[in-house]
Image (cartoon, helix red, strand yellow):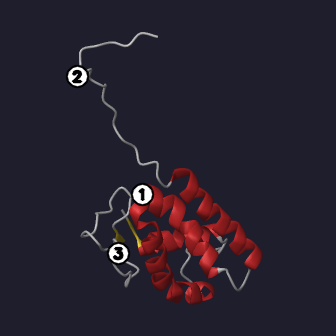
Amino acid sequence: MATAQHIFNLSMALMDELSMSEGNPTHAETRDYLLRTSKILTVLCNEIYTLSDTWEKAEPGTRPVYAEVTDMNQTLDLDRFITDTVLPYGLAAHLLAEESPRLAAFFLQRYQGLIFSYGGAIPVESEPIRDVYGQRFVN
């Protein structure tokens, strides 16, 4: 699991917003991004929650809802593939939507592609199929 700050840092690296001297994403130029991040992450986490291997089914008749992201040091209860690979692209897309629509579209396409390609691919274990009837079918 990762923090909201970790996802923000990865997004800033994708957006080429790290400070030249320290490689740190938290500086004056990224203040606006930082202020918007927790709200955007709340929306993105709710979009992707059911694709994480950490989600819990909701009560019958209700939807599973992810907790609001309120603090950048908050640990997000999502698997590392989601936090380290998918969410940084989604966050970058939303942060750049007005400033750089072309780059935002690239990040959004990557975000959606990752969800489509890997979203439902949670690793599972297989087990041999047992013949419960004791008969074999021959072609």
Labels in figure, total: 3
Q: CA distance from mark 3 to mark 1?
A: 19 Å
* Residue 115 vs residue 135, the one in the foreground: 135
Residue highlighted by disc 2? 132
* Residue 32 vs residue 61, the one in the foreground: 61
Q: CA distance from mark 2 to mark 3?
A: 40 Å
Residue 106 appearing in the image: yes
Residue flagged by tag 1: what amino acid is it? Arg
Task: Tell me which residue sits at (44%, 72%) in the image.
Answer: 45
Spot the residue most to the right. 102
Left or right for 1, reference 102: left
* Mark 2, secondary structure of its residue: loop
Residue flagged by tag 3: what amino acid is it? Val
* Mark 1, secondary structure of its residue: helix
Residue highlighted by disc 1? 80
Q: Quadrant of residue 56?
A: bottom left
Q: Quadrant of the N terminus?
A: bottom left
Question: Tag 2: Cα neighbours inside 10 Å, few (<14), some, or many (≥20)?
Answer: few
* Residue 12 vs residue 125, the one in the foreground: 125
Residue 83: percent from left, percent from top: 45, 63
First along the sequence among labels 2 and 3: 3
First along the sequence among labels 1 and 2: 1
Q: CA distance from mark 1 to mark 2?
A: 39 Å
Residue highlighted by disc 3? 65
Question: Tag 1: Cα neighbours inside 10 Å, few (<14), some, or many (≥20)?
Answer: some
First along the sequence among labels 3 and 1: 3
Q: Nearer the viewer, mark 2 or mark 3?
A: 2
Q: Quadrant of residue 138?
A: top left
Tag 2 and tag 3, C-beta contact below 8 Å: no
* Mark 3, secondary structure of its residue: loop
Q: Nearer the viewer, mark 3 or mark 1?
A: 3
